[in-house]
Structure formats: C-alpha cells, structure tokens
Image: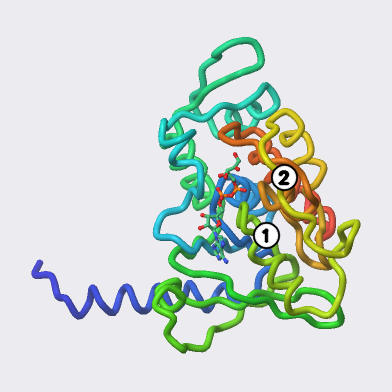
Amino acid sequence: MKLDEQVITRAIIERFSKKLLDNLSLDVAVVGGGPAGLVAAYYLARGGCKVALFERKLSIGGGMWGGGMMFNEIVVQEEGKRILDVFKIGCRKFKTGYYTADSVETVSTLCSCAAKAGVTIFNLMSVEDVMVRDNRVTGVVINWTAVEMSSLHVDPLCVKAKFVIDATGHPIEVIKVIERKVDAELLTPSGKVEGEKSMWADVAERTTLENTREAFPGVYVAGMSANATFGNFRMGPIFGGMLLSGEKAAKLIMQRLKKKGK
Ligand code: 48F
C-alpha cells in the first residue's frame, strides 16, 4: 500500500478536532499534568467522570522527571507508597519509612494509566483564565502554549467544567487568576492567596493533604498548589503528598458529583 500524506494530514486534523469537540463540556478540568494532576485525573476517570487534563508543556509530568536536583529518583514515605503500588510502580525501601522510585518510570506510568483510564490529555495547551457565573467557576479558558510564549494577540477558546482542579504547582495559576480578576474572596483565611513558605518536608507533606480542598467555589487545589494557596511549606523531592493529594481531590469532587469511585 502506498502512503498518502493527505490521508495522514486529514487523519490528524479530524481525530484531534473530534477529541477537542468531545471535551468542550466536562465534569472536571484538571489544570497541570504534574503528579498531583495526573493522579487526580486518573481516579476521576476511573470513577466515571468526564475529565480532561490541560498541560502547558510538551511533556506531561511537571516537576517529577528531574527527581531532586536532576538526580532522577524520587522519595515517598509509607503512605505515598500505597499509591505507587496501585499504579504498580516499582519502589525500593531505603530505610524504615522511606522508599525510592525511578522518576522516569513513575511519570510515564502515571501518564499511561491516566490515559488508559479515560483521561483526555491536551498537552501544549495553557489555561489562561476561567469563566465565572454567580460567584462560581464554570470552566476554563484555553490557548496554545505557543501563542502564550510568542505573545501573539490571539483570542482563546473555552471549555465548560463542573469542577476545576488547580494542579499547577508552585505558581497556582488558576487561583492567582481568580484572585486577580474575580471580585470575590478565596476560601482561605484571608480571602487571598496565603503564599508558599520555605522548605519543611515533614510538615509540608501533612499539610498538603489537609489543604487539598475547595479554594474557590468550583475550584479545588491539589499538590503544591494546595500549600501555596493555603499558606504552607514546600517539601522538595518527596512526592507522597503530591500523589495522596491527587487522590483526595478526586475523592472530594466525586462526592460532590455523586460518583462512586472504583
Ligand atoms: O509542578 P508540578 O509537578 O505540580 P505538582 O503536581 O507537583 C509538585 C512537584 O513537582 C514539586 C514539589 C513537590 O515535591 O514541590 O514541585 O503539584 O506540575 C504542575 C504542572 O502544571 C503545568 C506545568 O507545566 C506543570 O507541568 N501548568 C502550570 N500552569 C499551567 C499549567 C497552566 N496555566 N495551564 C496548563 N498547565
């Protein structure tokens, strides 16, 4: 059979267009494809939610690829190991309570499992704004990262979502947009972003989980975004909190959507 470039081109355009059209109205839009976003998206899809994940970069995985300071190993504690086991990611005991995993295996497996569970992943797309009706976020405003990077004046498009997860990590981009543009308070003690504090892994891992909650009507924060929004420490290359936070965000949203998790 002779290959025809026109067929290849048409296949890509038609399939991608359908994928985008099929995802214009979601149960959950996950913003950011780091460990927290990937785990949240995976559990939501497994629980029967229609979920798409928007990732600014070419590659999914956020800050996990580089382990700690480009040594591509990550550390998880006992509680975090439970999630690695769910995904069948190999991990080795380092000493009591500490396990290590290969960061490349971890990211690629989380990504593969999320996609296979039914999450539609849009890479190279940035969420630049939100839609708000009656003091509740009702969707996200998306644009190509290439447009953002080149500062081209190109208007975005919109995706409706019953819930949004800000899993954008340290910069908390969705929450910051809300703080800047919406004339209403966040669900934080001050009504504003409380801000990230410096490194304290032990406390940060615990509080990441506590801070995984709704930060504005319709928007949950997961992963590093949770601590940055509610004002707590960073934790560095220990990733259990990120994984558990993704799981918790999914559970909380599924309760709101009255979906039963698997
Ligand atoms: O930073 P990231 O890995 O967030 P996380 O899941 O994990 C944090 C850890 O990696 C580490 C840490 C804990 O050990 O402190 O930093 O909370 O992933 C966030 C992803 O969101 C993407 C960004 O490219 C990254 O891949 N992202 C950020 N802003 C946007 C976005 C946006 N506006 N639209 C789309 N993607």
- The answer to which image quadrant residue 190 occupies is bottom right
Going 64% across and 39% down the picture, which residue do you hit?
243
Q: In the rendered structure, which amino acid carries the disc numbered 1?
A: Asp
SS assignment at label 2: strand
Residue 209's x, y, as percent?
A: 77, 40
- Nearest-to-viewer mark from 1 and 2: 2
Q: In the rendered structure, which amino acid carries the disc numbered 2?
A: Lys
Most extreme residue toward the left is 2
Most extreme residue toward the top is 96
SS assignment at label 1: strand
Task: Check disc 2 and report the residue beneath it.
Answer: 197
Residue 2's x, y, as percent?
A: 8, 70
Could you tell me how far apart the alpha carbons at marks 1 and 2 are, in whole angstroms? 18 Å
Front residue (pair 70, 30):
70
Residue 126's x, y, as percent?
A: 52, 69
Front residue (pair 113, 139):
139
Residue 262 in sight from this viewpoint? no
Q: Is mark 1 within 8 Å of ligand 1?
A: no
Q: Residues within 10 Å of mark 2 (few under 14, many from 20)?
A: some
Q: Do the numbered discs 1 and 2 sit on residues whose CB atoms are within 8 Å?
A: no
First in sequence: mark 1 vs mark 2: 1
* Left or right: where 148 falls relative to 218: left
On residue 55, the disc is none
Q: Which image quadrant: the C terminus?
A: top right
Residue 56 in sight from this viewpoint? yes
Residue 184's x, y, as percent?
A: 86, 75
On residue 166, the disc is 1
Going 41% across and 54% down the picture, which residue do you hit?
59
Residue 245 versus residue 80 in the image, above or below: below
